[in-house]
Amino acid sequence: AQTVTQSQPEMSVQEAETVTLSCTYDTSESDYYLFWYKQPPSRQMILVIRQEAYKQQNATENRFSVNFQKAAKSFSLKISDSQLGDAAMYFCAYRSVKMDSNYQLIWGAGTKLIIKP
Amino acid sequence: DGGITQSPKYLFRKEGQNVTLSCEQNLNHDAMYWYRQDPGQGLRLIYYSQIVNDFQKGDIAEGYSVSREKKESFPLTVTSAQKNPTAFYLCASSKRGARETQYFGPGTRLLVL
């Protein structure tokens, strides 16, 4: 079974600086998807970025980018020019593309990101 | 406005009572999901449905039931058999298929009186 591990329960960063959140996962599959979701205090789960395992190029979305290391099974999220609105819980998630997985998301425990003004 | 709505935002349950959480989407998505979130943990899948009139159990289905009579709606009932129902419940939907992204509603907080 697949597992997702986020080893940093909490991280803090000064506003306008860069922070990297870590995620590792375990799988025997070669094709899958990885996601970063953000959960602000409102608790709505918001998609930040997604990565397809068969694509070597790292995904980027404005100030958010990932460092996807497939062999190392590592999927870190870099937030550049941190803003106060980035303060939230960040969750890493894995999804198989196999039909018998029912495409469910496997979640890490989350990292709380604090932005210092 | 396209999106996923969940109601109520807060729900209180008495001992022995069944309660139903609503989830509606107007995104024309075939697949819908129910997740449970406990403090300090990631989400866990309760039930999912890939098509109308069909649904399957997830990892923690015991004490819960669902129906999928309409494409837009996927209500979750927390039965009296669920002994520890206090949690945050999130509904999600997606297009059908392996490569589609799930999008989430705002959630319902369930508390036991």
Image: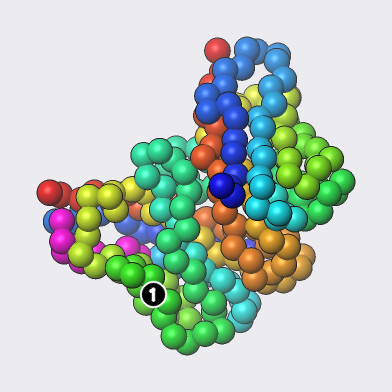
The image quarter containing residue A95 is: bottom right
Q: Position of residue A47 (x, y in %)?
A: 47, 58
The answer to whether residue A25 shows anywhere in this view is no
Q: In the rendering, at what x and y percent does residue A111 appear?
A: 35, 53
In the image shown, does A100 or B19 lie closer to the viewer?
B19
For badge 1, the amino acid type reads Thr
In the rendered image, residue B92, in percent from the top left (x then y), is placed at 61, 49
Q: Nearer the viewer, residue B4 or B39?
A: B4
Q: Up-down: is B35 above or below A49?
A: above
Q: Residue at x 83, y 49 (%)?
A: B52
Give the percent coordinates (x, y) of residue B12.
57, 17
In screen coordinates, is B4 left or right of B80?
left
Residue at 72% from the left image edge and 29% from the top image edge? B77
Read off the magenta span. A15-22
Magenta region includes residue B90:
no
Q: Furthest residue to the right?
A: B53
Magenta stretch: dominant SS?
Answer: loop
The residue that disc 1 covers is A60
Outermost residue, bottom side: A56
Q: Is residue A117 above or below residue B36?
A: below
